[in-house]
Amino acid sequence: MNPEPVSQRSSDISWSRPQDWRTLLTAVQRPVCHEPRLKSARNLAADIRRELSGIFPVLDGLCHRSCPWCPDPCCLNARLWFDIKDILFLLLTDQQPCSHRNQPCRYLGGRGCRLPRLRRPFTCTWYMCPTQKAILRQEGDLPAEKLLSGIERIKAMRKQLVSETGTEKFFYRLP
Ligand code: SF4
Ligand code: SF4
């Protein structure tokens, strides 16, 4: 069988069938958790964790100033899933990936997201709605630059996680 890139098969990338999610986790978890040569990947994941911790206070501030009064919360309409990079990051920082469900997001509670920021899909971290972008602009150039450059560094390191762990093959459709 010739695998098809998931980018061309958007219905496959959300692991919406429970058996796909289980297959993926089993396939990724074993080599990632038990392979000693992955020390550099673990170090990289620790760097990502540090970068994330650096931008969370800014994101918390933005959320604090916008989300409680939001007339149309984005999480109600979000179609989210944990992608391979999310899963790698969680496993390599000894966190258990949550099982996947989408629309409406199962992690949305009465007071916002029930997941700690560190365990959310990365999309939930970098996404900024127009209201938050406007607030960020009011803060001036420096906080915006700091936040956006942090996000760019994290994106680059997440890509590197894939090559460090040799998990490119999981970007193809599961058998
Ligand atoms: S991030 Fe923006 S759209 Fe989403 S809940 Fe907060 S204010 Fe609303
Ligand atoms: S994981 Fe949390 S932040 Fe992301 S869509 Fe779900 S409720 Fe919103």
Image: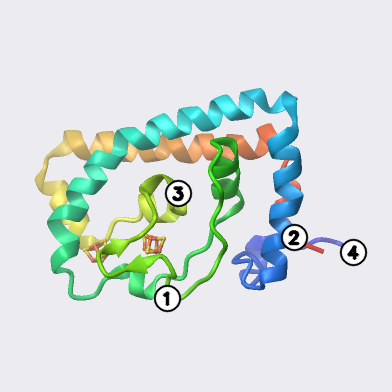
Label 1: which secondary element: loop
Report the amino acid beneath label 2: Thr
Q: Given contact means CB atoms under 8 Å apart, are the residues at marks 2 and 3 in contact?
A: no
Q: Mark 3 points at which residue?
A: 119
Q: How far apart are marks 2 and 4 (CA)?
A: 18 Å
Q: Is residue 101 left or right of residue 131?
A: right
Foreground label between 2 and 4: 2
Q: Given contact means CB atoms under 8 Å apart, are the residues at marks 1 and 3 in contact?
A: no
Neighbourhood count class around disc 2 (C-alpha, 10 Å): few under 14, some 14–19, many 20 upward: some
Q: Quadrant of residue 90?
A: top right
Question: Could you tell me residue 143's position as x and y percent?
Answer: 19, 36
Foreground label between 4 and 1: 1
Label 2, ligand 2: CB separation under 8 Å = no
Label 1, ligand 2: CB separation under 8 Å = no
Neighbourhood count class around disc 4 (C-alpha, 10 Å): few under 14, some 14–19, many 20 upward: few
The answer to which of marks 2 and 4 sits earlier in the sequence is 4
152 in relation to 79, above or below: above
Marking on residue 23: 2
Report the amino acid beneath label 3: Arg
Question: Could you tell me residue 166's position as x and y percent?
Answer: 73, 38
Q: In this view, does 104 lie to the left or right of 41?
A: left
The answer to which of marks 4 and 3 sits earlier in the sequence is 4
The answer to which of marks 4 and 1 sits earlier in the sequence is 4
The answer to which of marks 2 and 3 sits earlier in the sequence is 2
Which one is in front, 116 or 63?
Answer: 116
Q: How many labels does the image show?
A: 4
Give the residue drawn at x 33%, y 61%.
113
Report the amino acid beneath label 1: Pro
